[in-house]
Image (cartoon, grey):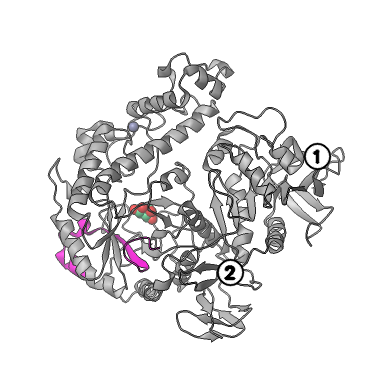
Amino acid sequence: MFLTPYPHMLHGADYNPEQWLRHPDILRQDIEQMKQANMNCMSVGIFAWSALEPTEGEYCLDWLGGIIDRLFENGIYTVLATPSGAKPLWMSQKYPEIRRVNAQRVRELSGGRHNHCYTSPVYREKVRAINEQLANRFGKHPGVILWHISNELQGECHCPLCQEAFREWLKKRYGTLDALNEAWWTAFWSHTYTDWTQIEPPSPRGETGVHGLTLDWKRFVTHQTCSFFENEIAPIRAVNPELPVTANLMGFYDGIDYRKLAKLLDVVSWDSYPAWHSQKDGDETYNAFWSDAFSDYCRSLLGKPFLIMENTPSQTNWQDVCRPKTWGFHRLSAISNLAHGADSIQYFQWRQSRGCAEKFHGAVMTHANRTDTRVFQEVAGVGAMLKKLDALCGACTPAKAAILYDTESHWAVNAAQGPRNCGIGDTDLMLRFYLPFWKAGISADIIDSDMDFSAYDLLCVPMLYLLRGDVSRRLQEFVRRGGTLVMTMHTGLVDEHDLCFMGDTPGEGLAALAGIRYLESDPLYDGMEERMVLVREPFPMADEYRAERLCERIAAEGAEVLAVYGHDNPCMPDDLPCLTRNKVGRGTVYYIAAFPEEKFLSDLLIPICESLGIRRALDAELPHGVTAAARIAGDGTRFVFVMNWTREKKTVTLPKPMKDYETGRVYQNVLPLAPYGGKILTAAAR
Ligand code: GLA
Ligand code: ZN
């Protein structure tokens, strides 16, 4: 299954010819230089609205047509963007309503980007009209392979139009004010709504204490963003429903629920910008795993490969310190993107702007305008590698383990006041669960409460604070059918309205499923620790581990106690469980009451995987800093990717001879890895 009508790995960049229309010499050079960089696609038009519609209703598409034609004649495809990410000044001047109003209720001035109102009928109409022009002219162009809708959809608007739309959305959701008041528990602090017009989105100047409101506002922002998106794609679909659409996501951005947006996409894409080389010892493990985690999240969204729409070939201009990828590192980061499901490596940006905010952002072509730079050569090298990887296009990543990370629960647990207001750490905990899988080369999906659990043997549920839909029923079913569930503290405390469950928690039967009962939660200040002391090892484990941040006190009610808290408080009992196990039906439930150190999770989760027969990408012990991942192509070829994130040489003992897919060289039993080296392997023929 190919992501675009073009059955090759994509290699390209954001291309802004509109900045160079007065420099035909540069535009001519671009094409030749792109070919030298082994590029086969360009994302064009992302911020080109004022060049496409310089005055209201006057469309100038010829220059873009010329660019798309010329690229195509030279074997370079176009990922065509709609320009809504930045609005022309004539428009924001004439129609102030399209400018966003912030949470302080102040309307923004013109300028910047990603700051339009999603509700404004005027803006929607302007977007529809320009998209119609683009679609009519280019929607069937043989060189256009994908629509890139807007850019990095984000943010919220508190203007009167958005507020009114929010109230309408609430009316549909609740029907009556009475139902809304009950769902939001508004008798608290006398905040009962007696008229719909009293409802306003949360604001630092107003309401922040009605958590049901906060949660519904976030749901509405997602709804409105999706509705804006649907307005964008309507004219595009009308012309050519076959041409796929994507939106470029941002790593773990939580302003909108990406799971909902993804339902409108044919292809998921994301912009990957880890803070590479931020560690003194050169160990990139912790930067790499964050990026791969989001790749796995993107892969899980539609259950298929995704695109890397942007990454920098060298450095950014917006991180605290903008270090360039060091010698050879770009190839490694690209291999790792492919390993976790990417079918492209694309850059921000093809050519550095001469002026304005991003003039010092890394690019394939820098101001020096030379192709003999280190960065250009490394980019061309990645392009050459991708040219050999047609067989990888569309290759899938079957996962038997998954981590449930629900955006609505994440919103709610972070908006809740208490028990830990300096960071409840749900995302950190999710990533800490992900890390052992990543290190061991076991593919893991990252899914939400609505997604199907039936394909998995192991399901991790870290801090699923909010239970919505029928998730608790499906978790119980998952276990009864033989699944292994690993659940943690701070799970199942509230319902979909952020109302606390009455009775024992984790609610909706999950306490009984785990064979435990929540007693109290004891958050720790940063730097404080308790210990997790094993009293009955489920697998060979260390005697004890560290716990931090949030210690939940629980009672075992049917579950076996595997570990108890070790502490320095003479008044506290010594038998308070922090790890339990309960057998239910054919399945098993582990409950981790503490926020454990990383090693605890790897010592628990990897043996669980082994006991369940969950396979690693490479059946080998990987030294620290070396990771592996696998993808399976349509013809059954199993691609194994091995990455060395350290600046030391490493070796891996292979379980069987493997062939370097690029060079054809066969490694019998030892695979050498250069510092920051990466290899793509397949089984060697016998
Ligand atoms: C984002 C945007 C790009 C550019 C890059 C810079 O990903 O989509 O337009 O600003 O950041 O890193
Ligand atoms: Zn608005």
Query: Quick check: which quadrant has ligand 1?
Result: bottom left
Q: Position of residue 464 (x, y in %)?
A: 61, 42
The residue beneath circle 2 is 617
In magenta stretch: residue 26: yes
Q: Nearer the viewer, residue 432 or 341?
A: 341
In magenta stretch: residue 477: no
* For residue 417, above or below residue 341: above
Which residue appears at 59% of the width and 54% of the height? Answer: 402
Mark 1 / mark 2, whichever is N-terminal? 1
Task: Classify residue 394 as left or right of residue 84.
Answer: right
Residues at marks 1 and 2 touching, judged by CB atoms closer than 8 Å: no
Q: Which residues are magenta?
A: 1-29
In the picture as drawn, the residue positioned furthest to the top comes out as: 194
The residue beneath circle 1 is 557
Say which amino acid is labelled 1. Answer: Glu
SS label for mark 1: loop
* Disc 1 to disc 2, C-alpha distance: 38 Å
Q: Nearer the viewer, residue 514 or 317?
A: 514
Can residue 424 be seen by looking at this rendering? no
* For residue 388, above or below residue 120: below
Which residue appears at 38% of the width and 30% of the height? Answer: 158
